[in-house]
Image (cartoon, rainbow, N blue to C red):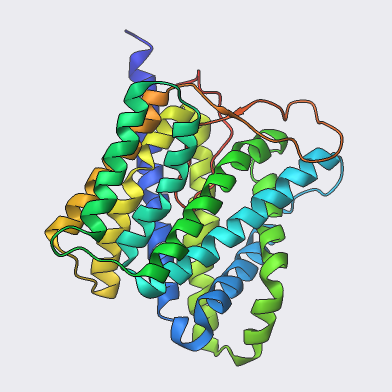
Amino acid sequence: MGARGPARRSVLFAAGLIVVGSAGIQTSSALSASLFASYGALGTSALRMALAAAILLVAVRPSLRGRSRSEWGGIVVYGVAMAAMNISLYNAIQRLPLGIAVTLEFLGPCAVALLASRRIKEGACAVLSLAGVALISAGPGGYFDLWGYVAALCAAAFFGLYTLFAAKVGKAGSGLDGLALSVAAGGLLTLPFAAVHAPQVSLPHWGLLALAAVVGVAIPYSVDTIAGRITSARVIGTLFAIDPAMGALIGFLLLGEMISWTVLAGIAVVALAGALLVWASGDSGIEVPEPPGEGCAGTEGTIPAATPASHSTPAVDPSEG
């Protein structure tokens, strides 16, 4: 009984950190949406990523030495997935309410968790997720936009790839070093799109982009890393189910987006199904594909069943917590 108290406090503390990170990411998306008319979804995402990379590189000062080809491969793939995921999500937000876009994106880690499982109850959770999507799109008062759905599902696909490499990068690096380098890789990938718009950005818009980079990347990814070090991957993955609801709330408060009770019910169903799926899949994982090159001791293994939408998933032992 004595060990349960500290473990429970760790979970509660982790839950608080996840709420902070989720609120930061969805707030950043809402702030960035106000810039779409000036720079487009691609330009806004690229500018934010470039600023986030600069901020993290200065703050963390990661070492470039002593990393194997395998580790660099994981860092680059992680960064590419991160950049593509954010660009896809921003394109979805242009056409869909924030809560709906984030909910559809959340299907990515749900799919990863499903692939890691082999039991009927996990399949039932997946069916429940699809029922929630049906409520969102086809139910009374539902909301459907073809290209918005395509962009959101692309974000989900890249989120799945992101999920596979997130913990690998965390395991191979030391704390935030790998994360900072991955964000830098994503920033380099999108730098040409940022460079096109950079001369047009006004001083107030630079301030807004910097705020979005800090609130939506630097702080959330850092607190997620801390949360992952004090509890298990299964607990963290389950807590991330707050993202769809947080997206709907921030969309309402900052963007004035009104969605029907039916759509809200669909969002709740998808979030609940995702949480149950991650929890039910327990300690199961998916083998991470090894990038070409030499292996690195300590980087092999499995990936936790799910990660947060647009979050950094820390490397944690699922047996902890």
Give how far across and how far down residue 91 sits, in percent: 47, 71
Give how far across and how far down residue 117 sits, in percent: 46, 25
Q: Nearer the viewer, residue 30 or 76?
A: 76
Question: Seen from this angle, which residue lies furthest top?
Answer: 1
Q: Quadrant of residue 288?
A: top right
Q: Nearer the viewer, residue 22 or 279?
A: 279
* Left or right: 301 in relation to 260: right
On screen, 266 above or below 292?
below
* Left or right: 260 in relation to 123: left
Q: What is the count of numbered marks?
A: 0
Q: Quadrant of residue 43?
A: bottom right
Quadrant including the N terminus: top left
Give how far across and how far down residue 11 sits, in percent: 37, 29
Residue at 50% across, 18% down: 319
Quadrant including the C terminus: top left
On screen, 52 above or below 208?
above
Residue 23 visible in the current orientation? no
Residue at 65% across, 90% down: 199
Q: Nearer the viewer, residue 12 or 117?
A: 117
Give how far across and how far down residue 311 sits, in percent: 50, 49
